[in-house]
Image (cartoon, rainbow, N blue to C red):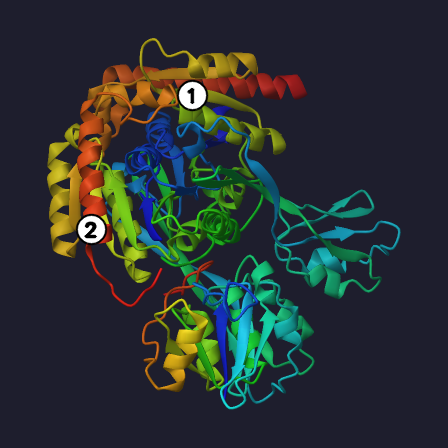
Amino acid sequence: MGLSELKVAVLSGKGGTGKTFITVNLAAVAGPSTYVDCDVEEPNGHLFFKPEYAAEEIVTVKMPVVDQRQCTGCRKCVDFCRFGALAYSNSGLMIFADICHSCGGCMLICPEGALSENEKPMGKVRKWVAENVHGLSGILNIGEPSGVPLIHELLSDMNDRPHPVFIDCPPGSACAVMESIKEADYCVLVSEPTLFGVHNLQIVWELVRLFKKPFGVVLNKVLPGEAMAESFCAERGMHILARIPFTQHLGLLNSQGSIAVREDEDTRAVFLDLLKAISKEVHCEATAHS
Amino acid sequence: MKQLLILSGKGGTGKTTMASAFVRLSKARAYADCDVDAPNLHLTVGWTKEPKRSHYFGLPRAKVDPDLCIRCDLCRQYCRFGSVILEGSNYRVDSLACEGCGVCEFVCPAGAISMEPHVDGELMLYSDAKTAFSTAKLNIGSGTSGLLVTEVKKQMRESAGTAPLAIIDGSPGIGCPVIASLSGVDLVLVVTEPSITGMNDMTRIVETARKFGTKTVVCINKCDTNMENTRCIAELCRGWGLALVGLIPFDSEVVKTVNAGLSIVDVDCQAGEAVRSVFEKTMDILFGENEGGDEQ
Amino acid sequence: MRIVMPVEQASSRGSIGASFGRSPFFLLYETETKESSFIENSALANPGGAGIKAAQLVVDQGVNAVLAPRCGENAAKVLQGAGIEIYKTSSRSIEKSIDSFVHGRLPLLEETHAGLSHHGAE
């Protein structure tokens, strides 16, 4: 599989390790490419690309709606709902959209046909282009319980987009992360070589193995003399694709929202090497399975 | 019991490092790690004792009995989460994708589907005569962590209910686990960093805490990595009427200390000094107001 | 008049629960006969929407008023939809709270908070 067909998900168990830094710079150095921001609770990638214009689409989820005139108060829907999204009192049936998981069960169970569905907005997808990078950013509405439907929407029309596609995943390993890596061909696990970083690397390592995704590790913010992450990876046969040193200069560029590969030749070289390393891994994977 | 919750919005700003320092400085008898996706607090607080472990059961998941299944495909058609998988001629439910809604159980004409209890995580309680430290780990693939966070806090309260102060290490983001951790909290300390991403996320977490009606204060970690942004954040706080309780400089000693499993106030370092000051100011605000009427 | 309050233990000497939706028991009290009974809060087991389920449970008990230190906005909507008033307690003592209510000293709960598992959508 060549780069032009590739979808790479960048994830880390711990927040703040540099997922966005890595994904943004990979997308920039690999252009034309696509950058997808699946960290829908706290999307940040667009702050680096600074696109001038974005087309916005509202993403909705299905929500039940009741026709009180048809409702007889039999309570079958209230008793069925495992999420507790329905309640009945003498003022009628109440539906709690923020609790509802949109399973459609209440509609099915209602003997009177009193329940139907509406679309409720839960977030936005912004589509933008910045130089040679196509971007999609997902922004979850504040208060929405789950970003999963939004992430699903973000990753749903990748076929028309320039590849390679780089997916900036949410931190952690819960359902939102799983949704983000589902369609990925390869995963880059970002770890900082600190006690917390390594501890959390363990968590995403379990996740990618569970999903049987080929993966490699990038150590970020590496300080001289640190061996914790190296031995962790060596002991488990995890391949380290790149070691990005911690420098104040990089830290400053990042904190200003600059795309380091566009400002710094050394960083550009590091990311070109990383891209090559990923490409080689994927090629080997494909060969091994052919 | 007064509860202090430490949040950040963005990961990696120093929430857990701050929480562990506060636990040390306050000699807290009750503390909890609500970052159930990726708990870290236990790595720095030095409990040598084994915790009491218990299973956390989330929503039951659907299971297909292959002997009763008549392969009508209704379950797969009605499942909105893509959890029903057809392998050859066998139907099975992917428990990672299953949301536990029960629709498949309802539509199955053969009674072949049942909802089974499912272990979604593990609760851990470290305790001795005086102190209780409650934490948990959500299993990979488990959904809602709001309940687990509530269980973590409940476990802490039940074990150390008479403690005057509880320090709670929150989770990143603004979703379910953060909302669940906000309940019953008296003060939120937002730990932010002066980067564009840090500031962006701070805005969202401050808004989340505000909607919940919880008093919030802010501190800026690694403040000298970008003084201009630090000034911007200070301005934002002024505009929002939020107290800025301190600035902590970037200190290379922090990583070394944390890697050694220690708290930054256990060693002599610049960041440690600054954190002491943040601690004092935060405690003043937390215990300063006389709410009256609320007997503890 | 039948009133209900979330409680931590199934005992009149116990304390009022901090969370309406997630307290382990509810105490039902008849102000005329001064009789108390306890019911288990079956909503506890729910990962989400516990407040709503708890409120439904309370509605089904035919109560006239709820005494609680706070209440989630979703649970409050259910209670208000059923015409049940929510009074704000400040003491953790069951006895004191009932006494204050009976003597008209408890204010109505003005502010509800966002749900503990999920927050109200925009």
Write down the quadrant of residue B258 in the picture: top left
Q: In this picture, is A6 found above or below B147?
A: above
Q: Give the spatial CA distance, label 1 vs label 2.
A: 42 Å
The answer to whether B175 appears left or right of A109 in the picture is: left
Residue occupying image coordinates x 18% and y 32%: B274
Specify few, some or many for label 1: CA neighbours under 10 Å numbering under 14, 14-19, or 20 or more: many
Rendering coords of residue A135 (x, y %): 36, 41
Q: Which callout, 1 or 2, points to the residue nearer the camera? A: 2
Q: Give the residue type that dot 1 points to.
A: Val
Rendering coords of residue B277 (x, y %): 17, 36
Determine the residue located farthest toward the top in the rendered image: A225
Q: In this picture, is C89 found above or below B39?
A: below
Residue occupying image coordinates x 29% and y 24%: B266
Residue occupying image coordinates x 42% and y 68%: C72
Specify few, some or many for label 2: CA neighbours under 10 Å numbering under 14, 14-19, or 20 or more: some
Which residue does the numbered mark 2 point to in the structure image? Answer: B285
Letter of the chain that mark 1 sits on in the rendering: A
Residue occupying image coordinates x 49% and y 26%: B48
- Using the image as rendered, state which of residue B99 and residue C19 is in the foreground: C19
Which residue does the numbered mark 1 point to in the structure image? Answer: A218
The answer to whether A4 appears left or right of A225 in the picture is: right
